[in-house]
Amino acid sequence: MELPVLKPKFEILIVDDVKDNLLALNAILERDDVKVYQALSGTLALEMMLEHDFCLAILDVRMPGMSGFQLAEFMRGSKKTKNVPIIFVTATAKEQNFSFKGYERGAVDFLLKPLDTQAVQSKANIFIELFKQKKELKDQLETIAGLIESLTNSKDAAEKANISKSQFLANMSHEIRTPIGAILGFADLMKNPNNTAEENQNYIGIVDRNSQQLLRLIDDILDLTKAEAGWMAIDRIEFSLGDLLTEFNSIMTFKAEEKGIAFRLTTETHIPDIVKTDNGRLRQILNNIVGNALKFTSKGGVELKVAFENPTLRFTIVDTGLGISSEQECRLFKPFGQADSSTTRKFGGTGLGLVLSRRISEALGGKLELVCSKQDVGSTFMFEINSPLLPNAKMVGRDTLKTMISEAVEYRKDGSFLKGLKVLVVEDSPDNQILIHMYLEKEGAEVTVVSDGSQAVKNALTDEFDVVLMDIQMPVLDGHEATKILRTAKFMKPIVALTAHAFKEEQEKCTASGFTDFLTKPIKRSVLIDVLSKYVPASN
């Protein structure tokens, strides 16, 4: 068995313009742990110095082109070679001026020609040993520095973990105590024998709502505990994906409208009508991610996109909410906190939703990730689950799903969808006044109609309206000017523009004037109701 060839540890550079001198010096320095590099000129020596870490340089003084002294000056001027020990080889070192010149150039010693083998080896051994000790010391310092850095990082990580856990426990305490406080308080009120049936019914509703909130919180904690321990149960069954999405769309649309924002469900590809996965866990992820998007979005809206590429079912959630900073991204999928504690104070929640959703998606053979986010612009999340196409499944197109969703929400447009909404309609056309009034009144809205912008300003500032429907082109005062006056007067309610112009420039002008929304003529009843439904007070 052949032993491996050891790589030389120590490199020495010898420079002389006479080949025989190099060979002789090389023979003297040769040993197992030394590699000698030979250069016939100063130029070649400089090239070698760029590639190697020499422990010693032995330079002949008298050479054509670049002398040993000149080469030494170059070496001392370079960061890489300024600390390499230099021994000059000369036949005239006994001359005092010559010696001074050598030491000025950085020499640590001289060798006299003809070379004394023992002297050369002795000096070389000293510098090799010094280099070895220096290298060992450097390695030790680097090891110590690494340990210090590691300890510092561990200390910082531990402190951050403790802070995160403390914040988490504080948040958890708040999230648990809040519904418990409501349950205990209203349960105590229900003991009063003088309560009316209506009062007790209201109290029961509050107790039930807070009980459900507390139950969801406990379920999240238990689910995360199971997921961390690898005990999460997955129950894959066949079910209608279209039905799940239709029901989910109805719930999220309602929640979005309560906040005055939009929710939209779209399909990017055909999707299977029947899938086999854990129905409840899929709903749990959707509720967590889309629910978060709605929670942190105060204007604009949230879109859920669904796509299927066998065997992967993909869901993409896009919102126009707060957005997430790069610093917050690092904590996003950790079990002990939301983006930051101020977020928790403002919006509530335990910060368990994302980490739990990631664990569930992984258990379903997929993943959850933040695709992109920008503060004050919005975020995009994407999660996938593994759900191979079933033999009995049919692919459902975008139009089919859209029809299912439309039919599911049609019941909401039965004459009570805008119940209690107070609308100020500003329109100079008598026919349009009658038409819009009938549309809104049939949907349960309370309608006041005026004919120009001046009347609109007066009525909006003296009466309580939930929304203003403002025509653009009117006598006396047009819609743009009226809206600017209202906004200057701190009128903060939504103002929806009615215009015959559908151009982008007109929309931009409306936005600049202070309009909240935009409708084009001729007015479609369904579109009008959809837009105004966003502004129905939550109490209604």
Image: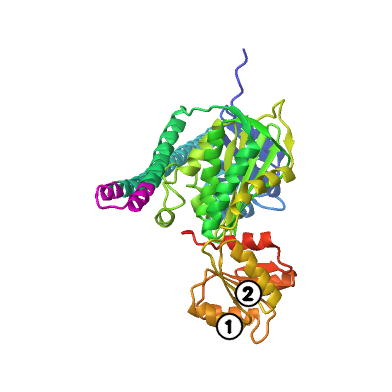
The vertical placement of 393 against 170, above or below, is above
Q: Is residue 98 magenta?
A: no
From where the camera sits, is residue 404 visible?
A: yes
Q: Are marks 1 and 2 in contact (CB under 8 Å)?
A: no
x then y, percent, for residue 67: 66, 52
Segment colored magenta:
185-206
Question: Position of 185 compared to 357: left or right?
Answer: left
How many other residues sit within 10 Å of disc 1, few (<14), some (14-19) or many (≥20)? Answer: some
Give the label on residue 455, or none: 1
Residue at 74% over, 41% down: 397
What label does residue 470 carry, if any?
A: 2
Q: Residue 34 versus residue 418: which sits nearer the camera?
A: 418
Local SS, label 2 = strand
Q: Is residue 354 above or below residue 65?
A: above
Q: Is residue 197 magenta?
A: yes
In depth, the one of 26 and 250 nearer the eye is 250
Mark 1 residue type: Gln
- Residue 156: horizontal and vertical position, in percent? 39, 46
Is tag 1's residue or tag 2's residue first in the polypeptide sequence?
1
Q: Position of residue 209 (x, y in %)?
A: 40, 46
Color theme of the render: rainbow
Nearer to the camera, 188 or 28:
188
Q: Provide residue 135's location: percent of width, then percent of height.
A: 48, 39
User: Circle 1 sits in a helix, a strand or a loop, which is it?
Assistant: helix
